[in-house]
Image (cartoon, grey):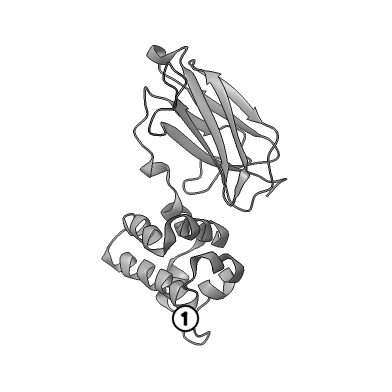
Amino acid sequence: MLSAIVDRIEGENFGGLSTSVLAKARDEEEKEIIKACLGNMRNRCDVVTAVRRCAPYAYATESVSTVPTWWSSLTVSRWNELLDESDDSPEPDGELTIECTNALISHLRGLVPVAKSSVQLRLRASEEQFGRQILVKREVPGSKGATKEWILAADRVVLLEDDEIPGHKSPIKYSASFLHGNGKKRPSVSSHCRAGSLVWW
């Protein structure tokens, strides 16, 4: 979980992560708790590019004798919910969806699906979109060289297996978007999901 927090800090800086996470806070009290946690991290390591190297230190409390409220309130489960971007994804374009179908444990809200080895994906499109080209893109946090793309024909159900999973310390992002007739991607991602591989994590 700490690695996932660092990924977001590197991608959005402290300010960007704070804004997106605070928007999901349950109430004003939790907003203050989140601010205290991120403020503590920033005070202990204000250089974004250095956070990963000292992440445990940055997340640690200033004193072990006086544990702050955020330490017990922001559990792994709660952080999973706060970092989950699925609620922020754009409205489906023509009802295009993508999901991992072979997770070892599924249907648990807030937890990223983790497959044993290869990741099996299922894409669905509405009937009026059948035959259109879909671009599926794999992105691995911190590893641009691990990016991979597939082009598929839209149908009611399209199955895709990623059996060349790169090593990763954070969940892999799979995004799907329709292509224009000229082969160019639409300006916004239609749907995305995150998954991991137990073998390569």
Q: Residue at x 49, y 77 (%)?
A: 44
Image quadrant holding the N terminus, namely bottom right
* Residue 25, visible in the rendered structure: no
In this view, which residue lies farthest toward the bottom?
65
Q: Residue at x 46, y 85 (%)?
A: 66
How many residues crowd mark 1 within 10 Å: few (<14), some (14–19), many (20+)?
few
Looking at the rendering, which quadrant does residue 86 occupy?
top left
Work out whether residue 107 or residue 128 is closer to the camera in this orientation and state it.
Answer: 128
Q: Percent x, y for residue 28?
A: 27, 65
Helix, strand or loop at mark 1: loop
Q: Which residue is mark 1?
A: 67
Q: Percent x, y for residue 65?
A: 51, 87
Work out whether residue 135 or residue 125 is closer to the camera in this orientation and state it.
Answer: 135
Q: Percent x, y for residue 11?
A: 47, 54
Q: Is residue 119 left or right of residue 185?
A: right
Work out whether residue 135 or residue 104 is closer to the camera in this orientation and state it.
Answer: 135
Q: Percent x, y for residue 184?
A: 45, 24
* Residue 40, visible in the rendered structure: yes
Q: Residue at x 28, y 61 (%)?
A: 27
Q: Amino acid at mark 1?
A: Val
